Image (spheres, rainbow, N blue to C red):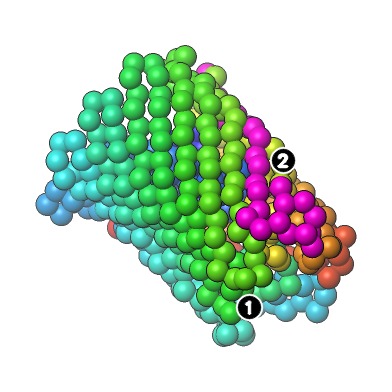
Amino acid sequence: MRGDSLVKHVKIGPSGRRLQAMHVFLFFMASAGVSCAQEALRSAIEADKNYRTRETVRYEKAEQIQVGQVILSAGASYSVEWNDNIYYRPSDAEDDFIHSARGNLSGFWPVTRSSFLSFGIGIGYQLYTEHSELSRLLIAPGSELAWDIELEDFGVTVFDRIEYSQDVLGQPGISGVARFPRLENTVGLRARWHPKRWVFEAGYSHFNFVSWAEEYDYLDRSAEQFVGRAGYRVAPRTIVGIEATAELTDFDSASAIDSTGMSVGPFVQWQLTRDIELGLRGGYVWYSYEDEPVQVGSGDVRSYYCALDARHRLTRAITHSLVVERHVTYSFWLGGRFMELLSVNYGYNWAFYRFAGLNLGFFYQRGDQPVQLGDSEKFDRYGLSAGLSYQLLRRLSAGASYRFVERDSDEDRLDYTQNAVVLSLNYRF
């Protein structure tokens, strides 16, 4: 699955060269709007990924700082980006140089022989040279406090995950604005029971979305999210099963519509060979509005989701991946209404030299969303990226990348084309 692959190459790789070689690719994949089905399922999969990250760090050896029983990892980075369309406009584009400084700290504390407290926080600041009003604070995705309790074949995790961002590029339904400030927080509980070959999991989380700009208050909401899974391990690293989610969403704004949603479908985690990993999931999704929105038609949304995640290590130096997803998510333009989105993402990573790496990426998205009452938008968005990285010193690496994104909408005012060049430095303590 995705989390395993990313951990092996990014979180605990023996060389900072691998970290930098993947840095641009991971940013690009995030920018392409990679997500997994509906909010409850997406939250559950994010929790899965973070758990696998913590589990791997627990058992793998890496260069880390130890303070008593607490093991720490820290890093810092600086980058400068030239962006030729910071407002994502179809015309009259404005460019700027954007300076970014970031720091991250993660820790692991074995409280007892069977319980582990983990935390991670990434904080940064972006400074716009010409448009200072757009300068912003960032709290990186993956900032989390988690307590894992493991008892033979049973485990429980209590977690709190937070992210503050103003990113627009990672939101496929948005255009014409330079920032989309919001705070997302998810606090929850996950339980795992793995008797012999069986896998049973259940979880509950409370999600809050808070916009930090008055013009986006109509998106403020909270949700109660539930997830359940049952699977069978047909091989040591291959699981077949079924998963279901439910969510109760309450919007703060009177203009938005509260809803109840559910999804159900099979999933497969398949280690096809030592070098090929496949993830498959899909199923039915249904949303019902609390109050029948006569002005927008039927109160029910009946659709489907599906996802393919394929990762292949061609050689010791070359890996590539393909992620194809079709899911339902909230529209940016109207609170409580839904967008259907198809996403295709491909990434290629080549460590062609002992201290250097090349990464390439491509994505395509096709979406259909309401933009105002009685009116919808269909759009295509695609882009590509290319990056080089080099290990300057044992703990210091440098990178250079280029990114191109184009959005083509049947609403001309929502089109845009954007080019960006990024130079970066990364240091591991």
- Residue 336 colored in magenta in the image: no
Which range of residues does the magenta coloring cover? 273-300
Discs 1, 2 touching: Cβ within 8 Å: no
Q: Is residue 173 visible?
A: yes
Please name the residue shown 44% across and 60% down the image. 185
When asked about the image quadrant of residue 51, the answer is top left
List the residue tagged with mark 2: 303
Q: Residues within 10 Å of mark 1 (few under 14, many from 20)?
A: few
| Position above or below: 168 against 365 | below
Please name the residue shown 39% across and 62% down the image. 122
Please name the residue shown 29% across and 34% down the image. 155
Task: Give the number of callouts.
Answer: 2
- Residue 295 colored in magenta in the image: yes
The outermost residue toward the left is 68
Q: Residues within 10 Å of mark 2 (few under 14, many from 20)?
A: some
Q: CA distance from mark 1 to mark 2?
A: 30 Å
Point out which mark residue 94 bears: none
Q: Position of residue 144 (x, y in %)?
A: 36, 55
Q: Position of residue 45 (x, y in %)?
A: 49, 41
Q: Is 149 placed left or right of 379 in the picture?
A: left
Instruction: Specify the amino acid type for callout 2.
Output: Ser
Q: Position of residue 207 (x, y in %)?
A: 46, 56
Instruction: Specify the amino acid type for callout 1.
Output: Glu
List the residue tagged with mark 1: 215
Looking at the figure, which quarter contains the C terminus?
bottom left
| Position above or below: 218 against 4 | below
Q: Earlier in the sequence, mark 1 or mark 2?
A: 1
| Position above or below: 7 against 387 | above
When asked about the image quadrant of residue 392, the answer is bottom left
Q: Nearer the viewer, mark 1 or mark 2?
A: 2
Q: Circle 2 sits in a helix, a strand or a loop, which is it?
A: strand
